[in-house]
Image: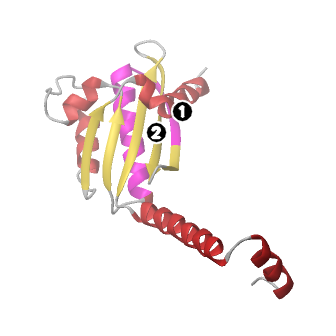
Amino acid sequence: MINKSLQAELDELVSKREQQAFVELAIKKELHKTRAMKADTIEVYVDGGSRGNPGPSGGGFAVYRGGENVLEGSEFYGEKTNNQSEYLALRTALREVFAHFPEVKINCFMDSQLVVEQMNGNYKVKNENIRPIYEEVSRISGQFKGFQIQHVRREQNQRADELANQAMDKGN
């Protein structure tokens, strides 16, 4: 609460209409922020990689809700192929998201066209080293209210790429 002398000074400098407009704008901003936080769809950016194929590998993910980064992480996977690390990164991301936000729809973005096309059923999973991870990721993704995955260019996946590189650095 504002004291009377300060209110009198404020009234001299700023009209009541301007004060009310300021308060209404602040309330609208907070409502928008609250609605965004309650949104039932989140964006998950995922990247995995290896230095060598196979080589030291890792993955990273960044989760956004209403445009705000709400969760991120990375993990070192040891000696894996690039494709294995991409799937392992997706598995790590979905596990973490489910642990924190089980009742959401996921819009997932990866720069691995192979993983995206396999998850969307457009490519068959032929590699027997990938199949068990693919099946687990498919099972986890099916537990959300909705799951979509799409391919993005590497430039649109920068934070996940940074986190994947940090994870790979742990193996050096």
Give the farthest residue toward the top.
52
Q: How many marks?
A: 2
Give the farthest residue toward the right.
5
Is 160 on the left-hand or right-hand side of 86?
Answer: right
Which quadrant of the figure contains the C terminus?
top right
Which quadrant of the figure contains the N terminus?
bottom right
How far separated are the C-alphas under marks 1 and 2?
A: 7 Å
Badge 1 or badge 2: first in the primary sequence: 2
Is 131 on the left-hand or right-hand side of 26?
Answer: left
Q: Residues within 10 Å of mark 2 (few under 14, many from 20)?
A: many
- Asked which secondary structure carries label 2, the reply is strand
Instruction: Give the image location of residue 49, x and y in percent.
Output: 44, 23
Name the residue rendered at 66%, 78% in the picture: 16
Find out whether the residues at labels 1 and 2 contact each other: C-beta distance under 8 Å: yes
Instruction: Give the image location of residue 20, x and y in percent.
Output: 60, 75
Amino acid at the residue labelled 1: Leu
Dividing the picture into quarters, in which one does residue 118 lie?
top left
In reply to whether residue 83 is colored magenta, the answer given is yes
Dividing the picture into quarters, in which one does residue 103 lie?
bottom left
Location of mark 2 (residue): 61
Instruction: Give the image location of residue 139, x and y in percent.
Output: 24, 48
Location of mark 1 (residue): 163
Amino acid at the residue labelled 2: Phe
Residue 129 appears in the figure = no
Residue 113 appears in the figure = yes
Kindly report the secondary structure that dominates the magenta region of the rendered protein: helix
Q: What range is drawn magenta here?
A: 73-99
Q: Name above or below for residue 143 compared with residue 17.
A: above
Point out which mark residue 142 bears.
Answer: none
In reply to whether residue 75 is colored magenta, the answer given is yes
